[in-house]
Image (tube, coloured by chain):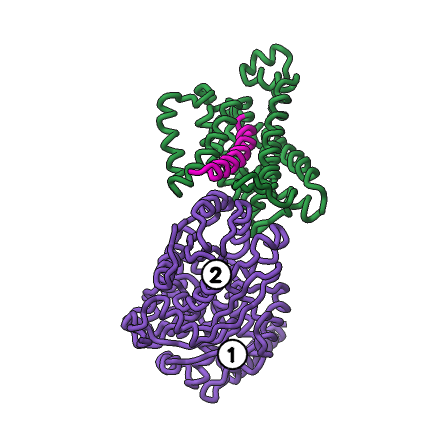
Amino acid sequence: MDLSLFFQCLVNGLALGGIYALVASGFTLVLGTMRIFNFAQGEFYMLGAFVTFGVCEVLNLNYFAALVGAFLTMALLGVILQRFVIRYTYGGFFHTVLATIAFSMIVQQTAVITFGKTDRFISPVVKGRMQIGEVIVSNDKLLLIFLGAALIILLYYFMKLKVGKAMRAVTEDQEVAGLQGINSRRIFTITMALGCGLAGIAGAVIAPVLGATAGMGHGIFIKILLVIIIGGMGSMPGALLAALLIGLIESFGYQFIGGYNELLLLCCLMPLLFLRPGGLLGRPLAIPE
Amino acid sequence: MKKLLVLKVMGLALILLALMVFSSVAVAGSDKTLKIGNTVPMKAKEGIQIKKWLELLAERLNQDGGLVVKGVKYNVQIISYDDDYSADTGRAAAERLIYQDKVKHIICQWGSAPIVATLMIAEPNKVLQIGNGMTEKTMETQWNYYYRTPSLFWINGQQVEWVEEFKKRGLPMSVVMINPDDVTGRGATKKNEMLFNNIGVKILDQLFYKRGTTDYTPFATKIKSLNPGFVDTGTTIGGAPTLLLAKALYDVGYKGGKFFNNMADTWKEIVDKVGAEAIEGAVGGFKDPREYRTEKWALELCDAYEKKYGVWETDSVNWINGWFALMAAIKKADSLDPDDLTRALDGLKFPGLYVNSKFVSRPDMNNPRTCDAVGQQIWGKMTNGKFRVMPIISIEENYKQSVVSYGLEKAFGLQ
């Protein structure tokens, strides 16, 4: 493998990993804090992409307005899901899972009926390509990597703020957090808003590169499950590490073994689960009754 | 009071009787109806558009006075069912058409699985079938009532031209083929493998992607690393897949030639969203009759479609050849009987909205019946950000180039 191909694969892997990291961090946040598997996480990603299309191509606004719009609308939708659906099923883990699956199916089918099966494309935010030696990378892909990294750094600093600390406290022990005066219900709402907002913004980041399509949520959700299993359930650093690893394995893997790169991923999963059942940086998550 | 009631009831009965007599006289005096069957996948835009075209064609024919056969006027009625692109649903739809609706002609089916499933019932019931489909099963000698148009066997004429085009530009004669990973994609790969081997193009690799893929970067990176003279995108459909693949190839800096079979539907969007540079010099098939047809009837038909449905769509202009073949055969035979029509279809040359075609035999399949249609070929090239239609390849030229490209000169008697 020559150096230019190596760097090409590296950039591709980082871009892919960045998207997985954004969607997975939102999922992990919700899972860690609320102990909920949000099966609709992929649909927030998909809707975020469509919001971006709407803002940029229909309303003809700035792309950064689309980023903010995607985050806020998905955050709001997440709060609606939490307040009107999850809140009533919170007593049972599997009830919540079923509720989010149902929500996911409703959203996906509504998207197919509303937007059809045609993909929507957004004009590139930064046109052109950058060439460094033999390596050529499109500017929109570089923007994707930059935005992905920036958002993850922002999330890191957010978790250091008072509300972020409160979320971590609730994750550790909800009861004790309550004794410290932390309103768990309010934290759950913020967590859901943030988790879904992150998925929405991931959709907004990917939209100029791959467009928006009604089926894109389903495809990424499978990868997110792999990310959280490999990274560790409820572990944000684990999710980030796993997302990057998966992106790189997919990118490099394809060059050497073609379409078997996904098989390679699954083959990596098996020994990992044997050696570290909790994932790379996580611990086994107790499923609430 | 009672008498009044009886009178009222009798009066009502008389009115009803009069209505019944009148309507039966009206029916007896009205034109006959020719039911023509069709099955298409209604979830695919191609299927929906085939149905729309057929309904429009039937409507216009009826408005123009209907179909006159042996002095009897027929109003044509299209009966179209969903075959879901599957053998099971296709068979059920065909059974309904043949046993319930009593059709004797089924046209413009799209998709090998439902076509072959229909054949199993159509053949013993002597129902004429004029359809599409990639599979060569339909060309076997056991079928006497199946005719194929357009045929995906007879499309090498334009591909040979494309390779010539790249040769003229000095590009190396090596190719990477990329196709969807399904029966159609693998079938197209096998067919083009034969073509490239016969015309001296080296195949560096064959790549397959899952339908629904949006990120073509890994494939584009692989193609760039192999650095072929050109890329054959095979049965990659128009719209998003073509745009995203073109974008991915451009993003990684691949500079070779590109065949995009369905670029014609998407080039404007590629130029707008990715840039003209991304597909400069790319070659591809073309399906907008408005751009190359000069016949008044064809242009009026296109306008009528746009007027009726409010949008101009070209995804299925080639898949409705069956209608034109059937109408030409009926006119020639002056009959609706499938046996008479098979004789009329023998070697028949007929105009279509997309291209003119001619039925030829398949000696390579030991089939002397002229059951497979060779058509003209329309292709274009991206030049300075615009899609330029190249000279039309004639039926004869396409036939010859296709036979030579398959290495079948001996079988077809061209040596």
Which span is picked out in magenta? A1-28
- The numbered disc on residue A33 is none
**B334 to B100, vertically: above or below:** below
At x 51%, y 72%, the residue is B392
Give the drawing colour for chain A.
green
**B79 to B75, vertically: above or below:** above
Q: Nearer the viewer, residue B324 or B7?
A: B324
Q: Is residue A254 left or right of residue A201?
A: left
**Is residue B51 in view from this perspective?**
no
Amino acid on which disc 2 is placed: Phe
Residue A178, given in percent of the width and then of the height, sits at 60, 13
Secondary structure beneath dot 1 equals strand
At x 46%, y 79%, the residue is B350
For disc 2, the marked residue is: B166
Task: Output the chain of dot 2.
Answer: B
Query: Where, quadrant-wise, is the C terminus of chain B in this rendering?
Result: bottom left
**B68 to B42, vertically: above or below:** below
Q: Mark 2 or mark 1: name the one nearer the start of the chain.
A: 1
- The numbered disc on residue B75 is 1
Query: Where, quadrant-wise, is the N terminus of chain B in this rendering?
Result: bottom right
Q: Nearer the viewer, residue A244 or A82?
A: A244
Amino acid on which disc 1 is placed: Asn
Chain appearing in purple on the rendered image:
B
